Image (cartoon, grey):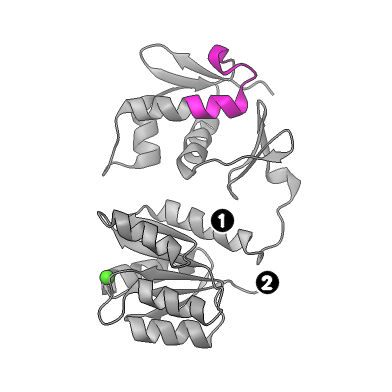
Amino acid sequence: MNKQKILVVEDEPAMLNGLKDNLEFEGYEVDTAPEGQEGLNKILNNRYHLVLLDVMLPNISGFDICKKVRQEGIETPIIFLTARGEEIDKVLGLEFGADDYVTKPFSLRELLARIKVIIRRTGNTTTVSNDNFTIIGNLKVNFSNYEAFVQGQAVKMSFKEYEILHYLWQNRNDMVNRHDILDNVWGEDYQPTSRTVDNFIVRLRHKIEDNPSDAKIIITVHGVGYKLVFND
Ligand code: CA
């Protein structure tokens, strides 16, 4: 099988090399550009499955690169790498024709998930076989491909919903406390309050349970956390 080819345009050497190593480890072929003009030339003259494009680059910004690429009619999927606080820029980025963005510092797992989703959406991968699906209540979910269905209809789930459900699934029939969920899904650097976990659980229950207000699958363990009940 041919490797999928990703271009990374990024002026911070540590970030560039880190992404290159990690993406290669994941099986992608990686090309790099340490500055914008070279990045633009490479996008215009090569075929990539996806481009990771830093926004803040010297000389020519990621936005301008994206705009030029789209003006040339090139539809290569682009994910912007933005810095925290560039909220308005994010919106602009999508208007310039990018497919998605991640905010630095981002988790590698989240970036990889988004890359997979976009490459799959743009039709460069073969369809997954059915046995990758796990049935949890009303939900049919593929954790490796970030796909989910309820009664045959694709349902939208956020990355965090997948990750929380996956964690509960790995610990099925065991009690899981909110702090474990926070540590495993958000990591130790940045954590929202445990209330956030509860909100995600509510959303998951709406997809999984027959009656979300009387949960039988993701049950609440009072004062502790949650338990995913699964009978083979
Ligand atoms: Ca930069």
Spot occupied by residue 150 in the image (x, y as percentages of width and height): 68, 34
Q: Which residue is mark 2?
A: 1
Q: Residue 191: x, y in percent?
A: 29, 37
Instruction: Report the quarter where the C terminus lies.
Output: top right
- Where residue 108 sits, quadrant-wise, is bottom left
Which residues make up the magenta segment?
Answer: 202-215
Write the residue at 57% across / 25% down.
Answer: 206
- Which quarter of the figure has residue 20? bottom left
Say if the magenta span includes residue 213.
yes
Residue 203 sits above or below residue 189 on the image: above
Q: Between residues 9 and 44, which one lies in front from this camera angle? A: 44
- Of residues 73 and 186, the one drawn nearer to the viewer in this rendering: 73
Q: Is residue 123 left or right of residue 189?
A: right
Q: Give the numbered dot on residue 117.
A: 1
Check disc 1 and give the amino acid type.
Val
Residue 128 at what x, y percent from top left? Answer: 70, 53
Q: Main secondary structure of the magenta part?
A: helix
Q: Residue 169's spot in the image, x, y percent?
A: 55, 31
105 relative to 219, above or below: below
Work out whether mark 1 precedes mark 2 in sequence or the reverse, and give the earlier one: 2
Looking at the rendering, in which quadrant would you find the N terminus? bottom right
Q: Are discs 1 and 2 less than 8 Å apart at CB? A: no
| Residue drawn at the location 37% of the way across and 52% of the way down | 107
- Callout 2 amino acid: Met
Q: Residue at coordinates 34% horizontally, 54% vertically from top-left?
A: 106
Is 164 within the magenta? no
